[in-house]
Amino acid sequence: MKKRSIYLVLALWVVCASRLMAQADSAETASSDLANKIQNPIASLISIPFQNNLDFNVGPFDRNRNTLNIQPVVPFSLGEKYNLITRTIIPISSLPVGMDDRSTGIGDINLSLFLTSAKPKKLITGYGVAIGIPTGKTGIGLEKWTAGPSFIALTQQNGWTIGALVQNTWDFAGSDDVVSDVNFFYSQIFVVKNLQKGWYVNTAPIITSDWEAASDNRWTVPLGGGFGKLTRLGKLPVNAQIGYYFNVIRPDFGASSQFRFQVVFLFPK
């Protein structure tokens, strides 16, 4: 009788342990999948990033500029083969004016639409368009409608994410009071290495060029990096990261460096 009881207890222990291990493996897999998705700008994942960029030594008086970008990402299924990924950037800026004043308010909204594969391969790609909407208040926005092609490509292997986003926009309507023409290049190269317990290190410099400026005064090229962590706020997954970038090439009166802080609220299916 005692042996049967011992065998029964052992059997129950094995069953419970097996279930707990399976749940742990499932949770670890889900966490790993989410860790990859947060590093993919065109993943089929609803998210709301809040990215704050503090730029140093801007303008002729070397003052600071602050921009909070609210960037909701919403994917839509277009059947079994394709997804449409929408990314909206709503900037709230505080810009230096002269030696002492500031202009604060909403800037021009940028909407990006990417067509992606619902079943991506090793090389993940997205083809789309970037549209600038002149919502900015006077002194902050360009007062121009802009549009242009946008392309993104990335690969994710062995905990690494490597990719690049490239777009160029031109004006097609609006006022000439701020600028007469817009021809603007924007790119972001991103390299991320996932570590243990949700931590990661990354670099994601934003490289830009104003083609309407003089040839020796167009480019902004930063170098830098940062780190972040995937955690939870209750049951809600949250991705937090910080980074610092030094502009090794910059136009006259452009920022010398930037401190970036970002919190992303994630809504996995």
Image (cartoon, rainbow, N blue to C red):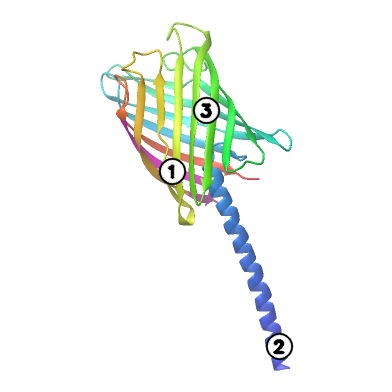
Q: Which residue is found at the position 57% from the left and 38% from the top?
A: 124
Image location (x, y in percent) of residue 123: 56, 40
Mark 1 vs 3: CB contact within 8 A:
no
Judge by depth and name the residue closer to the eye, 188 or 122. 122
Which of the two residues, 166 or 265, is positioned nearer the viewer here? 166
Q: Secondary structure at mark 1?
A: strand
Q: Amino acid at mark 3?
A: Ile
Disc 3 is placed on an element classified as strand
Which residue shows up at 26% across the image and 18% down it?
Answer: 60
Residue 130, image x and y in percent?
55, 23
Residue at which label 1 appears: 241
Checking the image for residue 204, the label placed there is none
Q: Which residue ends up furthest to the bottom in the rendered image?
A: 1
Q: Is residue 255 above or below residue 174?
A: below
Query: Is residue 131 in view?
Result: no
Residue 53: give x, y in percent of width and height: 40, 32
Between disc 3 and disc 2, whose residue precedes? 2
**Distance of label 3 from label 2 (alpha carbons):** 64 Å
- Nearer to us in this view, 21 or 234: 21
> How crowded is the residue under tag 3: few (<14 C-alpha within 10 Å), some, or many (20+)?
many
Q: From the image, tell me which residue sits under label 3.
A: 89
The answer to which quarter of the image holds residue 5 is: bottom right
Q: Which residues are magenta?
A: 230-247
